[in-house]
């Protein structure tokens, strides 16, 4: 009996244990799910949800500027009255000084501003006044000059900086000259630098093809471009002379329109306009045009030409004489220099410039030349013209640029017989983006080279970032220049006056010892 009771008790205890264990497992599972739900809810409730409301700045702009609520000052300019607030206008030093101190306007609720700058418009005033009520402003490139001019009047340096950023980003063929002139007017040096560099790169390769753009360049800017050693000269210096001739013609005849191109099947109507390529040569007067009253205004631009580099081909000299633009007296000194250089080389007194040449003198006297390479393949070329018996050929092969002293025996009488010739060269390679801004450039230092006959040397390996079309600009100096500053371009040296023919004389005068 006792044994039976003991077994029943054990069985009941086991059943109770199973029931308890089963319930505990179920509780644990439910508890886990509940815990996950609570965690998810906690995460959801504690995660901020961003919903855009009308910001304080937007409210201020809409209520105070657009709707003119609580305005305490009326500003009239260009015939329009703006209802504004002194507290916001005082962000401008112009208005801050006006409303403080003993100025009459400090207590007035109406101010009339006389605007004389033609660049400032009602739209630019609206944008600039509105910017005082906002923490950001939308600047349209088409309005940027007017906005800059307005910001300059009201001395808003922050807005001027933002205008400068937009102008630097949008400098192109349509804006470069205008941006440059604007930057000069308002003292924005960053824009002036970017616009001028754009023009140095693109002037000869692009502006020469557009009469409208070329005629928009004033004398001072043209002089600065023509005199810069960084000007990317396409072909040679004589190409620059041709562009200056066209530019001067367009300045004299602003209504000139280039004749339309016609195919061979149509009759060409004679053009009654003057021809820019022959106008100066066909003048009845023999007085050089730059010596005339009309031409005097262009003189300093033509003075910027490196005249010695206009005398390297007999055809170029013939054109100079026919055009009757440059006074022949201007050529006396460079002709004399060229002759002296040639004699020194012929007698082996000058083997060419060395690295000791001062950098400023190199940039002042070097030959500027260049070209555009359209496709990536093997190419070699030379810039033609008399080069003191040194025939230099540039070669591009497998993205490597080299230079060779070309010397063929059948041409020896025309070439320098010196075993070694020295010269200085600097090369710049440029790739442009769709706005013709510099996308990537690569340049060498001023290299001092000494080449044997037919010797070829490596100049540089092109960066992978350089893409075609590729602009190549070269500065080359093949004779040793005098290590002294240039003489005044308006006078000739005493030596040239003593040896070369003077105007109106049939024979040269020679100084007696």
Image (cartoon, rainbow, N blue to C red):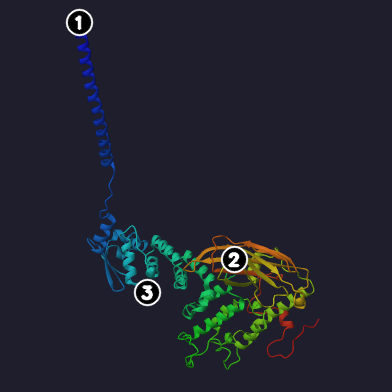
Nearer the observer: mark 1 or 3; the answer is: 1
**Mark 1 and mark 2 residues within 8 Å of each other at the beta carbon:** no
User: Is residue 415 left or right of 366 when viewed as pictured?
Assistant: right
Please tell me whether mark 3 sits on a helix, a strand or a loop.
loop
Q: Residue at the location (55% across, 80% down)?
A: 244
**Mark 1 and mark 3 residues within 8 Å of each other at the beta carbon:** no
**Gap between marks 1 and 2 measured at Cα:** 114 Å
User: Is residue 180 left or right of 226 when viewed as pictured?
Assistant: left
Q: Around disc 3, counting alpha carbons within 10 Å, would you say few (fewer than 14), some (14 to 19), or many (20 or more)?
A: few
Nearer the observer: mark 1 or 2; the answer is: 1
**Gap between marks 1 and 3 measured at Cα:** 124 Å
Q: Around disc 1, counting alpha carbons within 10 Å, would you say few (fewer than 14), some (14 to 19), or many (20 or more)?
A: few
Q: Quadrant of the C terminus?
A: bottom right
**Residue marked by disc 3:** 116
Name the residue nearer the viewer: 5 or 314. 5
**Above or below, 396 relative to 274:** above
Name the residue nearer the viewer: 23 or 288. 23
Q: Residue at the location (61% across, 91% down)?
A: 286
Residue 483 appears in view: no
**Above or below, 177 relative to 21:** below
Considering every residue shown, the one lying at the far right of the view is 513
**Gap between marks 3 and 2 measured at Cα:** 44 Å
Return the mark for residue 2: 1
Residue 269 location, x and y as percent? 47, 93
Q: Quadrant of the N terminus?
A: top left
Question: Which of the 4 image quadrants contains residue 323?
Answer: bottom right
**Above or below, 55 relative to 410:** above
**Residue marked by disc 2:** 428
Residue 226 location, x and y as percent? 57, 74
Q: Residue at the location (32% across, 64% down)?
A: 129
Q: Earlier in the sequence, mark 1 or mark 3?
A: 1
Q: Earlier in the sequence, mark 3 or mark 2?
A: 3
């Amino acid at each position: 009996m006792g044994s039976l009771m003991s077994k029943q008790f054990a069985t009941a205890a086991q059943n109770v244990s199973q029931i308890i264990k089963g319930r505990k497992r179920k509780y644990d599972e439910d508890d886990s799910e509940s815990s996950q739900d609570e965690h998810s809810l906690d995460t959801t409730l504690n995660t901020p949800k961003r919903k855009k409301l009308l910001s304080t700045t937007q409210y201020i702009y809409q209520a105070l500027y657009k709707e003119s609520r609580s305005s305490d000052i009326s500003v009239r300019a260009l015939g329009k009255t703006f209802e504004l607030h002194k507290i916001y206008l005082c962000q401008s030093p112009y208005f801050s000084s006006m409303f403080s101190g003993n100025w009459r306007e400090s207590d007035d609720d109406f101010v009339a501003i006389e605007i004389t700058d033609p660049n400032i418009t009602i739209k630019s005033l609206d944008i600039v006044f509105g910017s005082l009520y906002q923490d950001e402003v939308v600047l349209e490139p088409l309005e940027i000059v007017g906005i800059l001019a307005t910001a300059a009047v009201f001395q808003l340096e922050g807005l001027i900086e933002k205008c400068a950023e937009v102008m630097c980003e949008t400098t192109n063929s349509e804006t470069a000259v205008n941006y440059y002139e604007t930057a000069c007017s308002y003292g924005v040096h960053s824009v002036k630098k970017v616009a001028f560099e754009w023009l140095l790169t693109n002037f000869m390769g692009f502006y020469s093809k557009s009469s409208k753009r070329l005629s928009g360049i004033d004398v001072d800017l043209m002089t600065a471009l023509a005199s810069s050693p960084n000007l990317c000269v396409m072909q040679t210096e004589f190409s620059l002379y041709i562009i200056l001739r066209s530019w001067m013609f367009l300045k004299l005849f602003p209504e000139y329109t280039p004749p339309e191109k016609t195919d061979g099947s149509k009759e060409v109507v004679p053009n009654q306009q003057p021809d820019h390529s022959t106008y100066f040569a066909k003048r009845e007067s023999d007085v050089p045009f730059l010596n005339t009253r009309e031409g005097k205004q262009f003189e300093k631009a033509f003075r910027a030409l490196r005249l010695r580099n206009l005398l390297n081909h007999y055809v170029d000299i013939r054109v100079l004489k026919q055009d009757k633009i440059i006074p022949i007296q201007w050529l006396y000194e460079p002709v004399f220099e060229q002759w002296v250089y040639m004699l020194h080389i012929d007698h082996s007194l000058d083997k060419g410039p060395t690295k000791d040449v001062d950098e400023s003198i190199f940039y002042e006297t070097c030959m500027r030349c260049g070209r555009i390479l359209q496709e990536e393949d093997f190419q070699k070329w030379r810039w033609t013209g008399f080069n003191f018996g040194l025939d230099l050929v540039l070669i591009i092969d497998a993205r490597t640029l080299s230079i060779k002293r070309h010397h063929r025996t059948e041409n020896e009488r025309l070439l320098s017989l010196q075993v070694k010739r020295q010269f200085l060269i600097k090369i710049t390679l440029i790739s442009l983006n769709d706005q013709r801004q510099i996308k990537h450039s690569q340049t060498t230092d001023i290299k001092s080279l000494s080449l044997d006959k037919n010797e070829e040397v490596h100049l540089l390996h092109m960066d992978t970032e350089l893409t075609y079309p590729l602009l190549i600009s070269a500065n080359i100096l093949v004779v040793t220049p005098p290590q002294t500053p240039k003489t005044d371009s308006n006078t000739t040296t005493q030596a040239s006056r003593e040896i070369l023919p003077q105007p109106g004389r049939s024979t040269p005068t020679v100084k007696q010892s």
